[in-house]
Amino acid sequence: MTALVDPALSRWQPWAAMVEDFGGPEQMHGSGYWHLDGDPVPTRAGCAAFVTMTEATSTADVDGTRVPSTYFWIAAEDGDPDDDLVGFLHLRHTLNAWLFEQGGHIGYSVRPGARRRGHAVRALALGVHAAGRLGIDRVLVTCDLDNEASRRTIEAGGGQLEDEREGRLRFWIPTAG
Ligand SMILES: CC(C)(COP(=O)(O)OP(=O)(O)OC[C@H]1O[C@@H](n2cnc3c(N)ncnc32)[C@H](O)[C@@H]1OP(=O)(O)O)[C@@H](O)C(=O)NCCC(=O)NCCS
């Protein structure tokens, strides 16, 4: 199974193991790490900084370019406190001009050691459901033209291709029905 959980310092040990498995932030789409002052550090203090970052950026348009959003961590099982963490998912509540063209409502990544087990497909479905609870009718999800894993994740989630813009494929997924 797969669950979305709120970022929490109590989960710092599985969080640190996940960050180590990513081996660097380059593929941590949806994590929000770029709002940190530096790269994520796989320690308790590093987790605390990360959690504070997600809280600070989750509800406000901090600098006039970001929209309100929710950060989730992807848990391997049902979200119990001792679950392993396998990834990140970020749900943007609205689209600004860049998100409409390129970024979409939802971004996600799964740690290398937990890939190809269906976590991304299940996490995306949960993210779409969370968007529906916020009153969003359909979500935009995008991926690079050459990112087959992400494209297949979106297609498995019911994504309908609208077009390609500057190397990004843009799909819409209805949140209900
Ligand atoms: C994209 C990503 C999230 C997929 O995570 P995952 O948990 O391995 O995906 P799943 O196991 O749910 O598989 C989803 C689909 O992708 C396919 N897939 C997964 N990895 C693949 C790969 N390396 N090459 C081709 N297809 C792949 C699966 O077969 C499945 O397709 P299917 O339903 O048609 O069988 C993961 O590869 C990742 O984190 N990549 C780096 C970050 C990234 O690109 N994020 C998306 C940004 S738009």
Image (cartoon, rainbow, N blue to C red):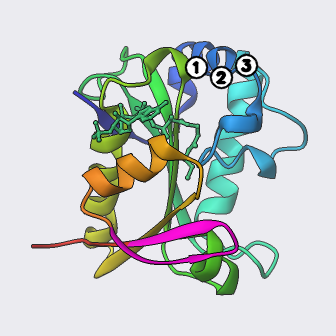
The residue to which callout 2 is attached is 22
Q: Nearer the viewer, residue 1 or 57?
A: 1
Kind of element beneath mark 2: helix
Q: Are marks 2 and 1 in contact (CB under 8 Å)?
A: yes
Residue 163, percent from left and from top: 49, 79
Q: Is residue 138 above or below residue 54?
A: below
Q: Is residue 128 visible?
A: yes
**Ligand 1 quadrant assignment:** top left
Q: Which quadrant of the structure image shows residue 136? A: bottom left
What label does residue 23 carry, if any?
A: 3
Q: Are marks 2 and 3 in contact (CB under 8 Å)?
A: yes
Name the residue type under label 3.
Gly
Kind of element beneath mark 3: loop
Kind of element beneath mark 1: helix
Report, in whole angstroms, how far the alpha carbon at label 2 lies from the one at label 1.
6 Å
- Image-based side of 76 in relation to 95, left or right: left
